[in-house]
């Protein structure tokens, strides 16, 4: 995907439509990884306990009803991922590090 930027007074800005697409793609990647981890557990509740997070919160993340998690939450998810992902990968797909903007 090519992202359009515009320079204004020496600063570069991402066009809003492209930024929304970028977050949509990032969100789908995160949800895909989270789903894969969740399915490696007996239940979503067991996964939530392993992450030390509320099961309702995990459900909302999986359904895309919650914004991207904060880095501490990503660290908890990575620790419970059974090797499926890493903290760094989660930070990348959620836009905290580059591939997108390191």
Image (cartoon, helix red, strand yellow):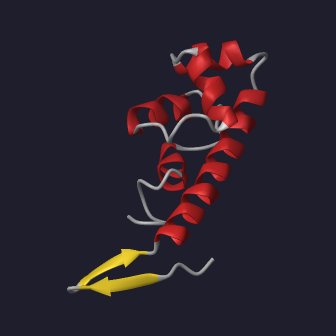
Frontmost residue, 23 versus 34:
23
Q: Position of residue 68 (x, y in %)?
A: 50, 42
* Residue 54, quarter of picture: top right
Q: Is residue 40 left or right of residue 1?
A: right
Count of marks placed on residues: 0
User: Residue 51 at x, y = what percent?
Assistant: 55, 21
Picture layout, residue 89 above or below residue 73: below
* Camera-side residue of 26 and 91: 26
**Which x, y percent locates residue 71?**
40, 39
Relative vertical location of residue 60 with respect to residue 17 in this rendering, above or below: above
x 42%, y 58%: residue: 97
- Residue furthest toward the left? 9
Query: Which quarter of the picture shows residue 72?
Result: top left
Q: Nearer the viewer, residue 82 or 42?
A: 42
Screen quadrant of the N terminus: bottom right
Q: Inspect this view and state whether residue 37 appears.
A: yes
Q: Quadrant of the C terminus?
A: bottom left
Q: Report x, y in % for residue 16.
A: 47, 68
Residue found at x 52% / y 18%: 53
In the picture, measured across the screen, residue 60 lies left or right of residue 97, that is right
Is residue 81 visible in the rendered image? The answer is no
Please tell me in which quadrant of the rendered image residue 58 appears: top right
Q: Residue at the location (72% across, 28% down)?
A: 38
Residue at image position (67%, 42%) is: 31
């Amino acid at each position: 995907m090519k992202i359009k930027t515009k320079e204004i007074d020496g600063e570069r800005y991402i066009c809003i439509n492209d930024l929304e697409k970028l977050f949509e793609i990032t969100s789908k990647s995160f949800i895909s990884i989270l789903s894969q981890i969740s399915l490696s557990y007996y239940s979503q509740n067991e996964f939530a306990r392993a992450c030390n997070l509320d099961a309702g919160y995990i459900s909302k993340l999986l359904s895309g009803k919650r914004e991207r998690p904060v880095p501490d939450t990503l660290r908890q998810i990575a620790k419970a991922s059974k090797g499926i992902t890493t903290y760094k990968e989660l930070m990348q797909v959620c836009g905290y590090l580059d591939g997108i903007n390191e």
